[in-house]
Amino acid sequence: MAEPDFSLIEPLEPSPGAWLDKVLADFDCFLADHASCEKKASGMAMSMASHYPDKPELLSAMADLAVEELSHYREVIRLMLQRGVSPTPDTKDAYVNALNRLVRKGTDVFLMDRLLLGAIVERRGAERFACIAAAVTDPMLQKFYQAIAASEARHWTLFYTLAWNHCDQQDVADRFQALTTIEAQIMLDLPYRAALH
Ligand SMILES: [Fe+2]
Ligand SMILES: [Fe+2]
């Protein structure tokens, strides 16, 4: 697949320190939410794979991604079990729901928006996991979140690259910039929780 020039993409609005404070104040609660996010990410990749059996690069990438996200889920669950933390029921993710409402109807734009919102959510995840890696003192947790951050950073560039290769490239660049601006506002307007979003 052709590679876009990522240096042309505008930087991400940083997550506020107040969000990180909430996470560090109740890390067990954050872990339960993190597990749930990984499980949902795997499900989302499987749903993308099912919807586009006619696009081999996308299908193959989503099949790989579903497995990788599920292995993240397994790693977070192991971490929770080690710490004696019980999983909690999945809750509504106001951030993801607000972003999903931005998906436009129409075959081409629907695919573009789903891929670009995938990129947006993964990019925010990568940024937030890196913040956590930098803030935790336990070396095991630090290593774990560094690895997760690197993995989610690969995912956002994967989603963007897939959009770049399946849709009009100028439209992809413009739409990503617009969605990035909207995402920053959504992220800043939501209450901060001991959760990924
Ligand atoms: Fe993940
Ligand atoms: Fe991911």
Image (spheres, rainbow, N blue to C red):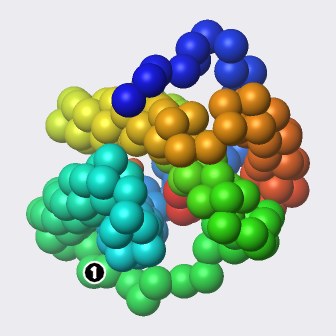
> Can you identify the residue that label 1 sits on?
86
Element type where label 1 sits in the image = loop
Instruction: Name the spot of residue 157 as percent of width and height, x first.
Output: 47, 33
Looking at the rendered image, the quarter that the N terminus falls into is top left
Q: Nearer the viewer, residue 78 or 135?
A: 78
Q: Nearer the viewer, residue 6 or 196?
A: 6
Category of crowding for the residue at label 1, using alpha-carbon neighbours closer than 10 angstroms: few (below 14), some (14–19), many (at least 20)? few
Residue at the (74%, 21%) spot, across then down? 10
Disc 1 residue type (three-letter): Ser
Residue at the (57%, 14%) spot, across then down? 5
Q: In the rendered view, does 77 fall on the left or right side of 111?
A: left
Give above or below for 93 relative to 156. Answer: below
Instruction: Name the spot of residue 75 as percent of width and height, x first.
Output: 17, 57
Specify whether residue 39 is in view: no
Residue at the (57%, 35%) spot, across then down? 164
- Classify residue 18 by image quadrant: top right
Residue at the (27%, 80%) spot, across then down? 86
Give above or below for 108 relative to 177. Answer: below
- Classify residue 99 by image quadrant: bottom right
Q: In the rendered view, does 150 fall on the left or right side of 9?
A: left
Instruction: Name the spot of residue 80 as percent of width and height, x first.
Output: 23, 66
Give the residue at the far top of this rendering.
7
